[in-house]
Image (tube, grey):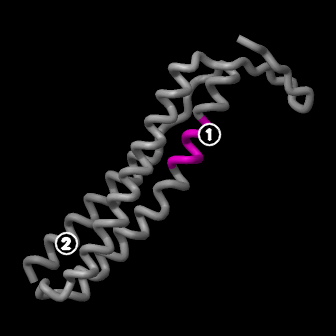
Amino acid sequence: MAEDSDAADGVTESEPDYRFTLANERTYLAWIRTALALIAGGVALKAVSGAFPAHWLATGVGVAATALGGALPIIAWRHWRSVQVAMRRGEPLPVQRAAIVLTTGIVLLAAALALAVLL
């Protein structure tokens, strides 16, 4: 493993085991697939929102799903990058916040969509 010393902050970095780097990349790509699914679901929901009694609410859920799908790659990329830096520096891995954002968002979207179906 090659070691580099960053003269600016005196931090020594080394190349992590490639398996950890690839695992981090696979996790990032899984978040990207989830974001694409949210965007596709939001667009589809908007397309069929007229079939719901509360079409305005179904449209809102579709827009919110699309917005969540648009925000998720930014959160995922920031986490991917912070994990890469932590691995290179031999530091503890950062806390995963994307899962909290995604879980909360999907629960709220599901509740709103259930309300749109029931109204």
Q: Which SS class for mark 2?
A: helix
Q: Find numbered disc 1 in the image and state the secondary structure of the residue it sits on.
A: helix
Left or right: 107 as drawn, with respect to 75:
left
Residue at figure coordinates x 20%, y 81% from the top left: 48
Relative horizontal placement of residue 107, taking residue 25 as reference (left or right): left
Query: x and y percent of residue 73 in the render?
Result: 50, 54
Q: Quadrant of residue 52?
A: bottom left
Residue that appears at 25% across and 81% down: 47
- Residue position for label 1: 81
- What's the residue at 39%, 48% (across, down)? 100
Callout 2 amino acid: Leu
Tell me which amino acid carries mark 1. Answer: Arg
State the residue in front, 96 or 67: 67
Q: Residues within 10 Å of mark 2 (few under 14, many from 20)?
A: many
Instruction: Tell whether position 81 is magenta.
Output: yes
Reading the image, the residue beneath label 2 is: 113
Circle 1 Cα neighbour tier, 10 Å, few/some/many (<14 / 14–19 / ≥20): some
Residue 36 horizontal/vertical position (percent): 39, 58
Q: Residue furthest top?
A: 1
Answer whether labels 2 and 1 touch (C-beta < 8 Å): no
Q: Residue drawn 63% across and 19% down?
A: 16
Say if the magenta span includes residue 111. Answer: no
Q: Over which residues does the magenta segment extend?
A: 76-82
